[in-house]
Image (spheres, rainbow, N blue to C red):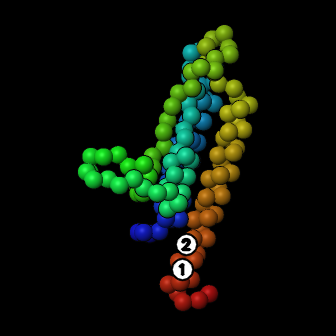
């Protein structure tokens, strides 16, 4: 829905969580691959910045080429993939811990389910508003 911050945050959160599920699944699949470096996906800090933007005082931009200190558009949020290579603890240089990855997978799945429930409630509210009642 255009102009609805909550809708945009839910959409971007689901996209980021889906990317995290993919990265964690790749980590689990490659846990026995020598020299494999595990991947992480982060996006929550960007979403938090968008949500808290109204509470921050934006710097005045006198030229469009100037940087802004506040992100104001939800479309600027994109999940960031990075490889974590500094945590090598196995002799084959693989740094995937199956227990940690399984826990991360379960956590991400629960967060994804919570966001889909929030999306369902949001859609239900729109239906009620459009339908004029129950």
What residue is shown with label 1? 127
Q: Secondary structure at mark 1?
A: helix
What residue is shown with label 2? 123
Q: Position of residue 47 (x, y in %)?
A: 52, 52
Q: Mark number for residue 51?
A: none
Image check: 33 left or right of 106?
Answer: left
Q: Quadrant of the N terminus?
A: bottom left
Q: Is residue 50 above or below residue 65?
A: below
Quadrant of the rendered image containing residue 101: top right
Crowding around mark 2 (Cα neighbors within 10 Å: few <14, some 14 to 19, many 20+) is: some
Q: Position of residue 127 (x, y in %)?
A: 54, 80
Relative depth, front residue between 51 and 119: 51
Q: Position of residue 115 (x, y in %)?
A: 61, 58
- Marks 2/1 in contact by CB < 8 Å: the verdict is yes
- The span from disc 2 to disc 1 (Cα, nearest Å) is 6 Å
Residue at the (51%, 48%) spot, across then down: 46
Residue at the (60%, 30%) spot, across then down: 27
Q: Position of residue 95 (x, y in %)?
A: 63, 21
Q: Secondary structure at mark 2?
A: helix
Crowding around mark 1 (Cα neighbors within 10 Å: few <14, some 14 to 19, many 20+) is: few
Relative depth, front residue between 14 and 49: 49
Residue at the (50%, 56%) spot, across then down: 56
Q: Residue furthest bottom?
A: 132
Q: Quadrant of the C terminus?
A: bottom right
Q: Is residue 17 above or below residue 96?
A: below
Count of numbered marks? 2
Residue 29 shows up from this direction: yes
């Amino acid at each position: 829905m255009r102009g609805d911050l909550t809708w945009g945050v839910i959409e971007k959160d689901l996209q980021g969580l889906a990317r995290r599920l993919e990265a964690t699944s790749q980590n689990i699949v490659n846990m026995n691959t020598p020299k494999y470096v595990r991947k992480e996906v982060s996006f929550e800090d960007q979403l938090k910045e968008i949500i808290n933007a109204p509470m921050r005082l934006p710097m005045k931009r006198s030229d469009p080429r100037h940087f802004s200190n506040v992100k104001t558009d939800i479309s600027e949020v994109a999940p960031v993939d990075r490889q974590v290579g500094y945590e090598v603890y196995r002799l084959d240089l693989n740094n995937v811990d199956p227990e940690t990855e399984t826990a991360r997978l379960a956590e991400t799945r629960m967060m994804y389910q919570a966001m889909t429930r929030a999306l369902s409630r949001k859609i239900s509210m729109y239906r009620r508003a459009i339908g004029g009642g129950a």
